[in-house]
Amino acid sequence: MQNIYETFEFNKIKEAILDFNRTELGKVFVEELAMLPTEKDVRDALLDLDEIMSIITRYGPLPISNSANALKLIEIAKKTALLTPRDLSLVAEDVLTAGKLGVFLNKLDSSYVRSKAYVEKFYDLSNLEREIHRVITNALTVADNASAKLKEIRSRLKVAERTLEQRVASLAITYGSYLTGDDATIRDGHFVLPVATVNKSKVTGIVYDVSDSGATTFIEPLEIVNINNEITALKVEENDEVRRILRELTSLCLLQEREIVINNKIISHFDFVSAKALYANKINAVIANISSSPLLDLIKARHPLIDERKVVSNSYHIDEQKRIIIISGPNAGGKTVSLKTVGLLALMNQCGLAVPAEKATLGYFKNIMIDIGDNQSLSDNLSTFSAHISQIAEITNLVGGKDLILFDELGTGTDPKEGEGLAISVAKYLENKHCFAMISSHFDALKEYAFLSDSIDNASMEFDEEHLLPTYHFRQSTPGHSYAMYVAKKYGINKSIIDEAEKYISSKDLNGTGELLETLQKQLDTANKTLDASIKEKELIDRKLKKIENDERLLEERKMNLLKDVKDEKAKMIEKAEEEIEYIMSQLNNGNIKLHEVIELKKKLTDLRETEATETFDEAIKVGDYVLMPSLNVSGKVTRVQGNKAHLNTSDGMSIDVPLNKITRVQAPKSHMKVHKTNYDARIGEGVGLELNIIGLYVDEAMYEVQKYIDGCRVRRHKQVRIIHGYGSGALRKAVHSYLDKQKDVTYRLGDASEGASGATVVIFK
């Protein structure tokens, strides 16, 4: 039977996922990726994936460091009883990674039940990590303070090495006239002097080497032999002590081998699922809904291995009413690609992967069996047709009701009439087995049989008859032509040959099947075009209605906020005026008040009442109006109105953008009125923090919040803030960047790894 993993090039999917792995065992999980054995396993895998995809979108990548395969480390420890400093450092790194994952995931809300459950299975090995890092340095050596004995040995070794260096330098001067070079060198771990061979008798010591020319003899002077021997002995001691320390650490790891392995597997699980999630984001994939009943429903599905700039998305639907689809259409029109797309996406889903589609609902298939492409087997000495029949025989012997079968060009490679009869018989057999199947074919009789069957549906690959080119669009419930005559005309086959061929076809088409199919196809094409137009019109209407509803909601919110602000500010102004009026009246009742003071107080009282009377509200703010922003006590002239924002030139010379629902129209100030500056920093943007989270909002809602937030940041004099928009489809990120591009007083960049990566934008105010 054909290997579905090879035929669908599933190894390329795995290679793409491996690019996102950080752990050795996680990579093993990806390399071993295959169809999960039960529907429950598929559901569990997709639930895990769904959570991690959501976490990455909202909070960024998981904090997973490079991790070794702990199983291999433990095996080495058991065989040698001695792990290297690098091996021990990897064990400690896993402990730190487990801690980081725990902190990261435990901060999330309670909806991430499955991920939190994995974290709870981590063992606390912090004592082991501290002991390893006490002993092993960042340079992957054993620290001097790993033991008192090691510290003492290394101290003595340093003293001996300094003494040796001093003695060698002194001897180089003493024997300088006998040397062929100025510096001592090392041979077999010993310091030696390069003595001219003719003078070797002048230097007492041990000969270690002679140069290739024989002109230089390397001698260890007798004066340093004892020091060299001491250093050699100390290094042996040092090595023995280091090995003893490493053996102790290795034993400590073996005492906790179960916990180490479990932690390593959990980290690798997170890495495995995270790699699948990051790959899903890369190809814009979605997690399929798992149907408990047989169903295959793929909306705008794409083949993940075809260049996204060239791939054509198609929708496929098979259910219990229409369990088999017969695909017809021109050669090189996309029939095989459709079969491979459906098969590969079903396989990906049952391997616990997201699928590249706009939406998907899939039942669980016990087996996915295929006969796609050229089946010729040279090694078995089988012809294309023989290999083809061999595959069909094996599949039909094994097929059951929960299987998905894909046949490419069923019945080809032999006499057309016999092949046609075989194709119809196989289709009937599959129909009786109640399996799901997609079959590509050119046979008219098979298409006619599909018309007569209740459980089989026709489909075709669309062909542009005007330009004589395939469009690669899949059309369900519409049979197709091979378009052989059209293509022959395009490529210049002699007209007399084509005429003769059409005459022959016409004479052989005794039962009118071809003509019937052509008539039905034209009728279906017309119906489909009408349906497509209706669907597009409905989608347009739905979008417009949604926008209107959204606009109405925002307008109502704006109105309510505006009325509330006006009401609150009015109440404050009235309260303040009443207090001042009460004060003035008390002064007027003062018997000692002078006449000119009475006149001045009465004028002030009149001004207060006029001010209260002239405050008006007009929702239709326009350019040239004078307005007041009650919440800030800021007034100014409107110079520009754009969307739900007004640009003001304030009375103290500032230029600011404010929401329309936060301002009221007032009378223009008189020229002699004094300008009272307002402490903007203390009043505006109360509650404006250093970050804004807009994840989960529609674009319109999000941009309203962003504009309001940036206004507040400006007057609060924030220097740098962060807007968290997540990964998702990128719509929020694009909208935020588009808005920031228009702001002359800011620059921005995507966050780094600690700031949310590409799920957040950092805004810097100039």
Image (cartoon, helix red, strand yellow):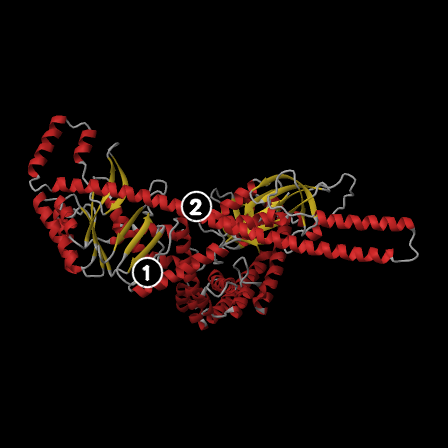
- Residue at x 52% of width, y 47% of height: 217
Under tag 2, what secondary structure? helix
Relative side of 752 to 342, left or right: right
Q: Residue 662 or 725: which is nearer the viewer?
A: 662
Q: Residues within 10 Å of mark 2 (few under 14, many from 20)?
A: few
Please say whether residue 23 is visible from this viewpoint.
no
Three-letter code, disc 1: Ile
Q: Residue 2 or 598: which is nearer the viewer?
A: 598
Q: Position of residue 350 (x, y in %)?
A: 31, 58
Q: Which residue is mark 1?
A: 290
- Residue at x 13% of width, y 40% of height: 514
Residue 410 vs 133, above or below: the answer is above
- Marks counted in the figure total 2
Q: Residues within 10 Å of mark 1 (few under 14, many from 20)?
A: many
- Residue at x 79% of width, y 40% of height: 672
Q: Residue furthest bottom?
A: 255
Q: Residue 234 or 494: which is nearer the viewer?
A: 494
Q: Quadrant of residue 322?
A: bottom left
Please say whether residue 256 is visible from this viewpoint.
yes
Q: Position of residue 247 (x, y in %)?
A: 48, 69
Numbered label attached to residue 166? none
Q: Position of residue 285 (x, y in %)?
A: 38, 51
Three-letter code, disc 2: Lys
The CA span between labels 2 and 1 is 32 Å
Relative side of 495 to 533, left or right: left
Under tag 1, what secondary structure? strand
Q: Which residue is mark 2?
A: 544
Q: Position of residue 216 (x, y in %)?
A: 52, 45
